[in-house]
Image (cartoon, rainbow, N blue to C red):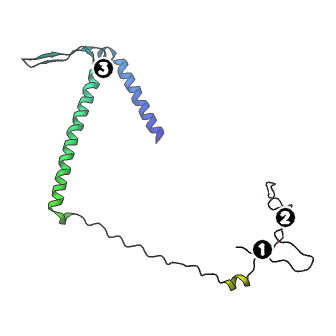
Amino acid sequence: MRMLKLYFYGLLVLLFAIFILQNYSTLTYSVALRLNLGFLSLVSIPLPLFLVAPLFFFCGLFLATIIGAGERHRLSREIKRLKSSHPELEPEPKAVPPPEPKPEVKPEPVKATQMESHPEPKQEVDSKKKSEEGTIISSGPLYKKTGSSEETNPPSRS
């Protein structure tokens, strides 16, 4: 779609250039505008036609915009007046059903006896274990291993 727009605008510029080249002598012809009201006579400075034509075009565009804005304002006032005088004709807003309440899920409190019955797993970490990048993860074991088959309890968390 973008390429189609680009081709269209390119074609417009090309046609505009051809128009200017073919009508160069007419477009450069100087025109002096005159207004004679009987008691007042005005004459403008001579201007080339390629300046006068766009000037009148944009003046007309501006005038049409002003007139259209006035008409829209008048119509919007009339619509407000009619709505206030006939409220039964106003469409009712569609009723939106209320959202369904989501059930609340509350976590169960952990009891102290449950914590003691499931101690954390004990693991031993090599002091030279490194990550993939080569940085040291831990400088020593998390739990000390004693000479007997018993392991010491991990330090309590406060």
Q: Where in the figure is residue 69, as x and y percent of width and height?
A: 22, 42
Q: Residue at x 33, y 18 (%)?
A: 23
Q: Nearer the viewer, mark 3 or mark 2?
A: 2
Q: Position of residue 59 (x, y in %)?
A: 24, 29
Q: Which of the 4 image quadrants contains residue 15?
A: top left
Query: Residue beneath label 3, please?
Result: 50
Please name the amino acid that badge 3 sits on. Answer: Phe
SS for tag 2? loop
Q: Is residue 72 above or below residue 154?
A: above
User: Quadrant location of residue 50?
Assistant: top left
Q: Earlier along the polypeptide chain: callout 2 or callout 1?
A: 2
Question: Mark 1 packing: few (<14 Cα in 10 Å), some, or many (20+)?
Answer: few
* Callout 3–callout 2 Cβ contact below 8 Å: no
Residue 124 located left or right of residue 108: right
Q: Please, what is the three-letter code of the amino acid marked with disc 2?
A: Gly
- Do the residues under discs 1 and 3 have CB atoms within 8 angstroms? no
Q: Which mark is residue 140?
A: 2
Q: Residues within 10 Å of mark 2 (few under 14, many from 20)?
A: few
Spatial CA distance of label 3 from label 2 is 89 Å
Kind of residue at badge 1: Pro
Question: Which numbered disc covers residue 155?
Answer: 1
Q: Secondary structure at mark 3?
A: helix
**Which residue is depicted at the point 75% across and 77% down?**
120
Query: Distance between the Cα atoms at labels 2 and 1?
Result: 15 Å
Check if mark 2's residue and mark 1's residue have beta carbons within 8 Å.
Answer: no
